[in-house]
Image (tube, grey):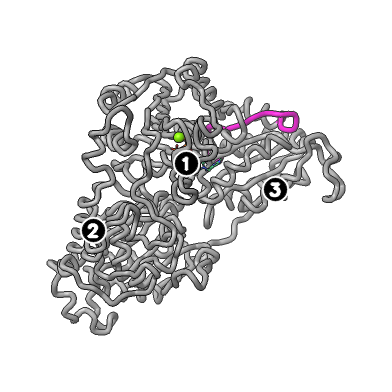
């Protein structure tokens, strides 16, 4: 059997049906084999960065794997940005790069190049993949493919790279004689003791917060997370990467938290006496830049499979009270043992008398101890809406928050929504109200401009659902060519350009740090943008234009009803800001624009001084509610 045919068959057996592939001299055999495979379809992007982003989007939707195949040299190096997306967000993606034939490979590392387009892929990708290896012998192909896919999907998932020299692709192999890879047996970790400690903390707590992140999804543990939430009935805050774990109206879902608020979520975490973080690495987008100001009154518990994530907090950051190095599935397995008992578990001995303390008597029901606390958070959420009614009165342009509100109102369960980088990402994440079954995706941690359009291609192919893609005008210019791929396959992707005629988020940063001195943010300061209507015409994609609030309802409906792809230009206010937002140095409850001190003090059950020292507890009227 030809080795490249074996590779194609292997990919099929991984339940892949679409392979993103851009050809070149060093990969023609693999390309040919995949093309001849009866059940695999090649999707050719216009650029390898787009192809690898599409593979990433495909993987996020299938919750299985994505695959991008490129030629040696520039083909491989073009994927770097997208591989970073998958690495930082823990998305399983297999990258296969062609390589010059083994007899042309440079004899020493110090030699720059021997074969044409020879590039040391393994060195380039080692720091942004879980596994990167060059295949040296045809007989290793089974072992390396199996090992790579196993590593991509197990533990903390992520991308892997196999570099496959041209002469090996065309080698003859006998599949029956190939060495297999035997995955190590996963040892179940018993967490009985650790879990009891957490239980004690929950039972003592009056204001707990559960922060859930994308790690729940990448381990496909959504159902387990739901059981956990419903047993303890703790209020849940979701990171951006975890925003689609629960619908917005799910009773325990208190919304987002972090540097872009919303204020309600931040008040909750800053007033909490216990924070349990599952599936989130508590990045600075959640905790704020000055991590010592994060949840200052809370005992903090974090469960993570990656030791480095648990150990990364330095002397100037907050301290974790309980760190559990474990697979979340083991953690939930331990939790499950309690689900048949009522909560609180009422084993007084477990909590050493805590249950008899009078602090518990204020709760309406012993079964739902945190109902009042959840109500308080919901009340904050209502009092400080992201999109107040006044925004609807704006004339002559579209307020980004109004657009997102209307879009989220009209989209249906099961739709897939993607958003890019910059202002459009923040406006979406602050304001989109998820419905059951919807997915909301971005490249959360690497956040390159130009991700959402190519990732939509992967999402559309994987999901066979309608895809709604939000991008900035700047972001679209970084991946404009992928409109060609969308056209080629007539994919049902509706692209909404948040056209603020520039780099909105950058303007805001320059307002903050450079007193509004702008460089490279709009046409006045050096950028250039095309007429997007002409762009749509060139790519033969239907074009729509939304210029003001009056046009949103009618035109949105038309874009949704239209068959095939759509490019919809939305005239966002060029001065649109991200509101609220944390200024560096402040703590999470104190977002800009600042609230009057008295108003904030009333909300803060535990007030934090700007410097980070903790003032003594001020019990406000709202605190008595709890
Ligand atoms: C590839 C890449 N280059 C630069 C940046 C830094 N950056 C983040 S957002 C942004 C501007 C984005 O402009 P646009 O896409 O129009 O979004 P807006 O903020 O206007 O919604 C820039 C330059 C980035 N994230 N990715
Ligand atoms: Mg813009």
Reading the chain from its start, which is encountered first: label 3 or label 1?
Answer: 3
| Residue 173 relative to residue 79: left or right | right
Residue 365 spot, x, y in % from top left: 14, 67
| Residue 343 relative to residue 536: left or right | left
Q: Residues within 10 Å of mark 2 (few under 14, many from 20)?
A: many
Question: Which is closer to the viewer, label 3 or label 1?
Answer: 1
* Residues marked 3 and 1 touching at CB (< 8 Å): no
**Quadrant of the snapshot with the C terminus:** bottom left
- Label 3 sits on residue: 124
As measured in the structure, the alpha-carbon distance from the residue carrying label 3 to the one carrying label 2 is: 47 Å
Mark on residue 377?
2
State yes or no: Cβ of the residue under disc 1 lies below 8 Å from any atom of ligand 1: yes
Residue 25 spot, x, y in % from top left: 75, 29
Quick one: 583 or 455, which is closer to the camera? 583
Instruction: Say above or below: 339 vs 380.
Output: below
Q: Residues within 10 Å of mark 3 (few under 14, many from 20)?
A: some
Ligand 2's image quarter is top left
- Is residue 65 among the parts visible in the rendering? no
Reading the chain from its start, which is encountered first: label 3 or label 2?
Answer: 3
Mark on residue 626?
none
Please state the extent of the stretch shown in magenta in the rendering: 13-29
């Amino acid at each position: 059997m030809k080795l490249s045919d074996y590779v194609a068959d292997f990919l099929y057996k991984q339940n892949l049906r679409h392979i993103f592939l851009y050809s070149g001299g060093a990969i023609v055999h693999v390309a040919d084999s995949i093309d001849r495979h009866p059940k695999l379809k090649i999707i050719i992007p216009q650029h390898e960065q787009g192809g690898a982003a599409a593979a990433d989007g495909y993987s996020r939707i299938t919750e299985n794997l994505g695959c991008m195949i490129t030629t040696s040299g520039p083909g491989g190096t073009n994927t770097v940005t997208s591989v970073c997306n998958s690495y930082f967000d823990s998305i399983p993606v297999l990258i296969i790069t062609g390589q010059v034939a083994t007899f042309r490979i440079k004899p020493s590392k110090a030699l720059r190049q021997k074969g044409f387009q020879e590039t040391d892929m393994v060195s380039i990708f080692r720091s942004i993949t879980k596994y990167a290896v060059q295949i040296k012998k045809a007989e290793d192909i089974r072992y390396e493919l199996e090992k790579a896919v196993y590593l991509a999907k197990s533990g903390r998932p992520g991308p892997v790279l196999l570099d496959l020299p041209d002469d090996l692709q065309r080698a003859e192999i006998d599949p029956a004689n190939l060495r297999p890879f035997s995955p190590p047996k996963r040892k179940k970790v018993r967490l009985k003791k650790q879990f009891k400690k957490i239980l004690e903390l929950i039972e003592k707590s009056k204001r707990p917060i559960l922060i859930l992140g994308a790690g729940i999804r990448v381990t496909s543990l959504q159902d387990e997370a739901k059981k956990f939430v419903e047993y303890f009935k703790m209020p849940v805050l979701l990171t951006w990467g975890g925003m689609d774990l629960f619908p917005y109206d799910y009773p325990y879902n208190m919304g987002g938290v972090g540097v872009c608020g919303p204020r309600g979520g931040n008040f909750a975490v800053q007033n909490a006496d216990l924070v349990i973080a599952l599936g989130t690495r508590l990045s600075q987008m959640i905790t704020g830049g000055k991590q010592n100001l994060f949840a200052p009154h809370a005992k903090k518990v974090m469960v993570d499979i990656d030791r480095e994530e648990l150990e990364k907090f330095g002397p100037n950051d907050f301290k974790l009270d309980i760190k559990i190095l474990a697979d979340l599935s083991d953690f939930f397995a331990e939790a499950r043992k309690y689900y048949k008992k009522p909560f609180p578990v009422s084993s007084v001995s477990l909590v050493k008398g805590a249950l008899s303390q009078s602090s518990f008597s204020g709760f309406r029901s012993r079964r739902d101890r945190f109902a009042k606390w959840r109500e308080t958070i919901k009340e904050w959420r209502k009092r400080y809406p992201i999109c107040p009614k006044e925004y609807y009165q704006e004339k002559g342009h579209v307020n980004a928050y109004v657009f997102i509100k209307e879009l989220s109102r009209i989209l249906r369960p099961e739709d897939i929504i993607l958003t890019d980088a910059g202002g459009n990402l923040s406006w979406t994440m602050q304001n989109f109200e998820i419905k059951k079954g919807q997915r909301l995706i971005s490249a959360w941690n690497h956040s390159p401009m130009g991700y959402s359009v190519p990732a939509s291609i992967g999402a559309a192919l994987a999901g066979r659902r309608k895809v709604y893609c939000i991008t900035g005008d700047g972001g679209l210019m970084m991946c404009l060519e992928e409109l060609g791929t969308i056209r080629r396959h007539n994919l049902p992707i509706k692209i909404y350009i948040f056209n603020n005629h520039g780099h909105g988020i950058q303007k805001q940063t320059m307002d903050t740090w450079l007193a509004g001195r702008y460089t490279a943010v709009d046409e006045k300061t050096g950028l250039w943008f095309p007429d997007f209507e002409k762009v749509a015409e060139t790519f033969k994609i239907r074009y729509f234009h939304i210029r003001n609030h009056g046009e949103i309802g009618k035109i949105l409906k038309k874009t949704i009803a239209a068959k095939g792809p759509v490019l919809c230009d939305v005239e966002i206010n060029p001065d649109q800001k991200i509101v609220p937002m944390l200024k560096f140095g402040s703590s999470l409850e104190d977002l800009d624009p600042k609230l009057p001190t008295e108003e904030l003090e009333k909300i803060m059950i535990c007030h934090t001084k700007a410097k980070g020292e903790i003032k003594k507890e001020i019990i406000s009227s709202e605190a008595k509610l709890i």
